[in-house]
């Protein structure tokens, strides 16, 4: 059976291409999905996607992944810095998770310096632009091959 990976994006990631292009780039959310889909095909893994601007919907979606999904790539966006609920959901399901940030949050405002999800993520990738999502998929494939 193919490895199943879910890519979860938090608030405002659907605005890629429009939103602060100097920070997040000119490519759209649809472009991101297509790029990840093509990469997943190449790597022979299944991928599905979820994006929400609502914290509770992200919690619901993580819970729904239990028993179905082998790895999660998550960019919790602004909820990175505030959400104990998303951290607890990831802990609840116990699915290996890689955290992604398009921008290099370590070089940004003080309020972005805390990440709750980092406490559970096997790896955090930041400042690599959209390519960071592909690097996250590689991390999960690597992790799965070592921990099966
Ligand atoms: C982000 C960084 C967060 O601080 C911000 O709130 C986002 C996007 C990133 O991908 O660089 O919405 O997670």
Image: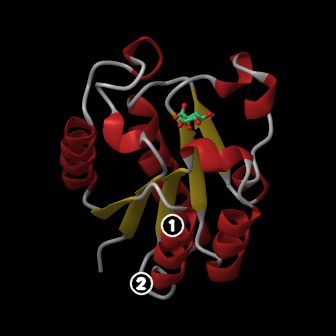
Are discs 2 and 1 less than 8 Å apart at CB? no
Pick whichever, 3 or 99, lies toward us.
99
Pick whichever, 119 or 89, lies toward us.
89
Q: Residues within 10 Å of mark 1 (few under 14, many from 20)?
A: many
- Is 148 drawn above or below residue 12 in the view shown? below
- Is 139 drawn above or below residue 54 in the view shown? above
- The single residue placed furthest to the front in the displayed view is 54
- Is 43 drawn above or below residue 1 in the view shown? above
Pick whichever, 96 or 106, lies toward us.
106
Please indicate whether residue 69 sits to the left or right of residue 47 in the image: right
Residue visible at 43% across and 41% down in the picture: 12
Residue occupied by mark 2: 68
**Which quarter shows the C terminus?**
bottom right
Residue 11 position, x and y percent, is 48, 48
Residues at marks 2 and 1, CA–CA distance in whole angstroms: 16 Å
Which image quarter: residue 147? bottom right
- The single residue placed furthest to the bottom in the displayed view is 67
Q: Is mark 1 within 8 Å of ligand 1?
A: no
Residue at disc 1, secondary structure:
helix
Which image quarter: residue 32? top left
Residue 48 position, x and y percent, is 30, 64
Q: Quadrant of ligand 1?
A: top right
Residue at disc 2, secondary structure:
loop
Mark 2 or 1, nearer chain start: 1
Residue visible at 26% across and 53% down in the picture: 40
Residue 104 position, x and y percent, is 61, 22
Residue occupied by mark 1: 58
């Amino acid at each position: 059976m193919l490895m199943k990976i879910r890519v979860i994006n938090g608030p405002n990631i659907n605005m890629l291409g429009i939103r602060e292009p100097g920070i997040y780039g000119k490519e759209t959310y649809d472009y991101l999905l297509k790029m990840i889909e093509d990469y997943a095909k190449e790597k022979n893994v299944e991928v599905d996607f979820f994006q929400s601007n609502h914290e509770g919907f992200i919690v619901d979606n993580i819970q729904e992944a239990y028993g179905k999904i082998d790895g999660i790539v998550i960019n919790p966006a602004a909820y990175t810095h505030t959400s104990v609920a998303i951290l607890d959901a990831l802990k609840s399901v116990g699915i290996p998770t890689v955290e992604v940030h398009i921008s290099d949050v370590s070089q940004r405002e003080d309020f972005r310096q805390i990440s709750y999800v980092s406490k559970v993520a096997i790896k955090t990738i930041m400042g690599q632009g959209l390519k960071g999502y592909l690097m996250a998929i590689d991390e999960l494939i690597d992790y799965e091959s070592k921990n099966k």
